[in-house]
Amino acid sequence: MSNSSPLFDASRPFPALQTSFSPTLPPLLPRAMDENGKRRRLDSPHGSSLYSGDRVPRRRATDASPNPYLSHRRDAHNPWTGRPYSEAYYDILRVRRKLPVYDARARLMECLRAHNVVVLEGQTGSGKTTQVPQFLAEAGFCDGGMRIACTQPRRVAAMSVAKRVAAEMDVRLGDHVGYSIRFEDRTSRETKLKYLTDGMLLREAMKDNLLKAYSAIVLDEAHERTLSTDVLMGLLKGVLKKRPDLKVVVMSATLDAQKFQDYFDGAPLLSVPGRVFPVDIIYSPQPEDDYVDAAIRTVISICRNEPTGDVLLFLTGEEEIEESCRKIEEELRPFERAYGPVVVLPLYGSLPPDRQQKVFADPPPPLYHGGPPGRKVICATNIAETSLTIDGVVYVVDTGFSKQKIYNPRVRVESLLVQEISRASAKQRAGRAGRTRPGKCFRLYTEESFHKHLIETTHPEILRSNLGNVVLQLKTLGIDDLVHFDFMDPPAPETLMRALELLNYLGALDDEGDLTSFGKLMSEFPLQPESSAALIRSPQFQCSNEVLTIVAMVSSAQNCFVRQKKKDKNAMRGRPPHEQFMDAEGDHLTLLNVFHAYKEKDKERGGASQWCWDNYLNQRALRTAGNVRTQLERTMRGCNLALVSTDYQSIHYSSNIRRALLSGYFMHVAHRNGKEYQTVKDNQKVKLHPSSGMRGNPAWVLYNEFVFTKTQYIRTCAKVEGKWLVEQAPHYYDLSNFPGGSAKEELRRLYRKKAKRSLPENERRRGR
């Protein structure tokens, strides 16, 4: 292996951190004077500066009063609760005051006095995510019943950061500090500081276009450029013109701040360093054929040969991570006495919060007195690049890949694909190794690949995503001119046209592109447009209760099925653990069976824990689906949508549910052509996913998801009848605008049959 220069220049250490905001000064008072009483420049000892020499009005320093939020006095009372501070508060306060961002507090306040938007560039570990919203709260931005919002691109970050900030402010989570993510709200009327996903703030904007509840909005991790973040930035530019009182802080962890400054009309830049130690970069001498196998071997080598320190391995998804955790644990367990105990932990977005929190725990102690210390090995997705900071990581193993959402508008297919990361992501990953001491980053690709093959930055989501939901949100916000909407990076016109076409077919937009009453109903649900349409139409098919459950199961982001271990007795007997729930007519009905069985068991004494364990079901996923269902049911009642069911014994029970699903997913249909299926209209050759329990190889199938691997699969499938297509969606299955193929010929036959059925009896007889 070859070594390169350290990623970070550590030729000289950063100066000792000095707190420039005294607890004896009022929250809004800047330190604009030096110790001699002279005006000083607003430059950070670590390189922070105001952009383009902006002038800030000078303020007098004669109104000093104690800052109750940062008191070191042991008899002080918490101004948020009125109670004395706990002992834990003082311990945390000492840690807070050592964070690099703490030194930039006064400069940030000065910037916000002079400007409505400030761009804050802070390296990971600088403390910006936890501290900046608190600076704003302590500066009076919560006065008068106002709130501060801090957006996060990921659910796990919103939850974990809110929990940490509540501890720092010595308040209960859900009271003065809370979080809001899709299908979960831990806020109250008391909440002043709200962490939420960017998508949730966007949904709030759909009901309150000017976001009048907020005095300040912090867009964190803006460099990730999620769909919702890009739309939010465009909306905020418009809101700022109508609300000169609103303050916006755009925070980025990478060196692309100039783009944000330009977008927000020359907003000032404040740079805050992280606490960075040198990191040695070690490249693979030649490309790896199997990056997962190479990653596992590298982790094992580190644990056997490198000094103590935790290991962070970047992989692409849940399946890869869980399998790698198992293999690493099996390889290292026999050598614990020689090399020290190792705890191997997964970390990905859909992991339950209690399991996510384990990555922040201390490594295990030595097995015996004087024995080698333990370490943690964390196998994570790119969620660990910037969203979460894990102290103790000394070694990073970078596979060079991540899963990214890719949309092809020509064939109307969106899927998660394993892609090479960007150079910016590679630098972020390497930086995780230098948080607490000098570290090493093992890149499982060549140095030439890094410089020649990796792109500079990851393409924004808006350039590679299906925009159906975005267009529906913008239309709901009253924004009709999508072509001239102020996107930071405008999406391709073809992608916008596909989104408009989708919403028009679903009935959300009329032929003029205006929002219909049905579209307004759809916008009430935090779901994909197809799911919203199916749910709203389900009362017509007498099965809204069942479709509500299915949509909740599909939308909860967690797989309810647990993979069976190879050594299990049932596996050895060849018995599929979920066979009892499977419905031959479709996977949606299988999910419905699982949920119904779970709810019955949950009523019994002792609950359903053991039952879930015995049947290889994820109880937390099922509990989450139940919570999602409750929230969606509340929305349905608010929209006056009937909650009805077809009798389970009825011969129409299954068909009603599948027809209701088809009313939203009629564009997600494949037709059998020999041994394979072809997607309707786009003629993509696909196979049923191996996880599907549907039987009989029906002629037509509805699917929820298109999966790209070495083979193209359709996943979560249900049998549908061809005649339903021409009855329920003739506007989409219009043969005059339909590509040739076996599906078109079959549809032509079905249309002829339908026309014949509609003739009077005597004409049908003559036709014979």
Image (spheres, helix red, strand yellow):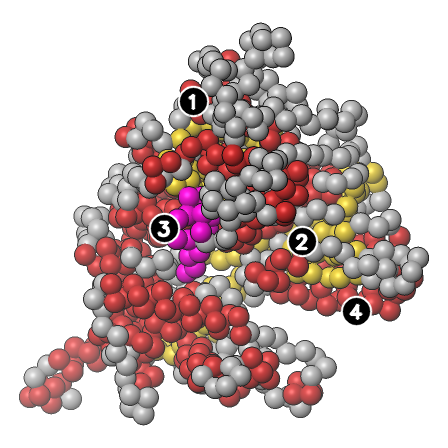
Name the residue: 47% across, 81% down: 602
Residue indicated by mark 1: 113
Q: CA distance from mark 3 to mark 4?
A: 49 Å
**Quadrant where the N terminus is found in the figure:** top right
Foreground mark, 3 or 4, reads 3
Residue indicated by mark 3: 189
Q: CA distance from mark 2 to mark 3?
A: 30 Å
In the rendered image, residue 176 lying in the magenta stretch gets the answer yes
Residue 177 coordinates in the image, percent (x, y): 47, 48
Type of the residue with mark 3: Arg
Residue closest to the eye, 170 or 460: 170
Horizontal relation, residue 172 to residue 470: left or right: right
Residue indicated by mark 4: 330
Structural crowding at the residue carrying mark 4, measured as other residues with C-alpha within 10 Å and reported as few (<14), some (14–19) or many (≥20):
few
Please report contact status of discs 2 and 3: CB closer than 8 Å, yes or no.
Answer: no
Residue 644 coordinates in the image, percent (x, y): 25, 78
Type of the residue with mark 4: Glu
Name the residue: 36% across, 50% down: 189
Sequence-wise first label, 2 or 3: 3
Q: CA distance from mark 2 to mark 4?
A: 23 Å
Horizontal relation, residue 442 to residue 197: left or right: right
Residue 323 coordinates in the image, percent (x, y): 69, 66
Which label number is shown at residue 360?
2
Which label number is shown at residue 427?
none
Type of the residue with mark 1: Arg
Highlighted range, magenta: 175-197
Residue closest to the eye, 626 or 561: 626
